[in-house]
Image: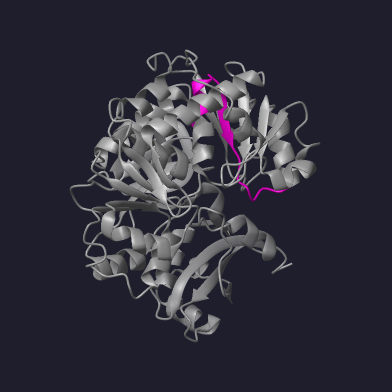
Amino acid sequence: MYDANPLIHHLRAATIGREAVVFATGPDVGTVSYADLFAGAERMAASLVSRGVLPGDRVAAQVDKSLTAIELYLGTVMAGAVFLPLNPAYTDTEVAYFIGDATPRVFVCDPARVDRLRTVAGEAALMTLDGHGNGSLADLAATQHGFDLVARDPSDLAAILYTSGTTGRSKGAMLSHENLYSNSLTLRDYWQFTSDDVLIHALPIFHTHGLFVATNVALLAGAQVVFLPGFDAEAILAAMPSSTALMGVPTFYTRLLADPRLTPELAANMRLFISGSAPLLVETHENWEERTGHRILERYGMTETNMSSSNPYDGDRIAGTVGQPLPGVEARVMKDDQAVQLGEIGVLEVRGPNVFQGYWQMPEKTAEELRPDGWFITGDLAKIDDKGYVTIVGREKDLVITGGFNVYPKEVESLIDDLPGVLESAVIGVPHPDFGEAVVAIVIPTGHDISSEAVSTALSDQLAKFKQPKHIEVMAALPRNTMGKVQKKALRETFAELFS
């Protein structure tokens, strides 16, 4: 029954014959078995088809995290449709763009927003689902009984995820069945997930990390899941003694480090802590090992590729790097369409079965970033050492060109972050009437007094004059998106008129 639908076939295979095993439990979830989960997904699929969903149609969902939302994801794929998760924090105007661009057959939203989003939905059938699994879609699903999966090919689309749109319009990355199952199978094996694992799932599910890494890997392993609505330090610490793995973003780890209850004894049953979606400070890496005895495993991925590299499960997890290319994935660093020497900085490109199919309705943009031979131009500046470890030094668009000289923000940030009294920093370029761009540093203190003059003095002997910030701003916090990434575009906008 499941063989005809490649992604669902792989996600279901680990638990055939083990339907009574617990998939998820949590404070707001209770106990849900694999049988319950997939039966619920089949009812979702039947509900979507009853609302006119055909193979290849898009199903958009702007809903809070819940197991019913996971069933909606699985049910969409079962119906042969394309799942389009949207951040619940998106405004009505932002949602209008996504709906207008993707033209979904069904749009599922929170009941509290349904009146405001009715005009945004356009021709899509508008249904509701809240964070507790209630709403018109859940009501319809409760009346359904079973479903025969729609046949799809590995190259058919399973999902569209819109990029965060830090520059220009958001782009819809088209992900096939093969893109998703091949990457998740690789991660399951590379990180050694098995049916003995218990994963703490505190990530959002509108993003690659929470949906296509955490959820898919757990399903493919037949693992149990502690399913949390979001980050909750109390719940995570309570779950640790009976869990084995946590996937998080750097903010998870810095917040947990602030809790004195985090000890080696508390983490004794855990075997793996994974971090991604944003760079992990070397300081956080070292503090975590000192407090728990575990080295965090950092990995690298993008909306367009899922995961491309990872520090090894067995082997050196090197702080400040994102590890080596995953099995089956190639990586290279390019400059002016030529491969650079080991250790030199250029633009990272990756190729493999994880790489997406292109951007939805943007053939020109696809051609710009996806080469005909399958190499994807990530836009990340990186270097690769002689052991194959990849270090990300920043975004190509974040490169500062001042007076004709290139300044890589990561180099300056690393020096600032090492200064006493500095928690973290962000370096940007802003317009300058003489130099074209000026280097500006935003510094976040640890709570101790630190002045811009002290930072400037400390850098004066460590950086060439052109790399030194022409302005240093001390702030309370850096602007971040939901996944913890620093929003440098917002910082550039804030300081755009600094030198005008």
Residue 114 placement: quadrant: top right
Residue 159 covered by magenta stretch: no
Left or right: residue 95 versus residue 332 is right
In the rendered image, the vertical position of residue 349 relative to residue 364, given as above or below: below
Instruction: Work out whether residue 79 can be spotted.
Output: yes
Instruction: Work out whether residue 404 can be spotted.
Output: no
Residue 485 at x, y percent in the picture: 51, 55
Residue 271 at x, y percent in the picture: 23, 53
From the viewer's side, name the closer residue of 45 and 293. 45
In the rendered image, the vertical position of residue 272 relative to residue 162, given as above or below: below
Left or right: residue 379 versus residue 111 is left
Residue 192 placement: quadrant: top left
Q: Number of labelled discs?
A: 0
Residue extending furthest toward the left: 315
Left or right: residue 72 versus residue 262 is right
Name the residue: 46% across, 18% down. Answer: 155
From the viewer's side, name the closer residue of 120 and 127. 127
Residue 166 at x, y percent in the picture: 61, 48
Residue 135 at x, y percent in the picture: 64, 39
Name the residue: 39% across, 63% down. Answer: 253
In the rendered image, the vertical position of residue 207 relative to residue 146, given as above or below: below
Residue extending furthest toward the right: 119
Name the residue: 26% across, 41% down. Answer: 193
Residue 90 covered by magenta stretch: yes
From the viewer's side, name the closer residue of 357 and 158. 158
The quadrant in which the C terminus is found is bottom right
The quadrant in which the N terminus is found is top left
Name the residue: 40% across, 80% down. Answer: 420
Q: How is the image coloured?
A: one colour
Magenta stretch, residue numbers: 74-91
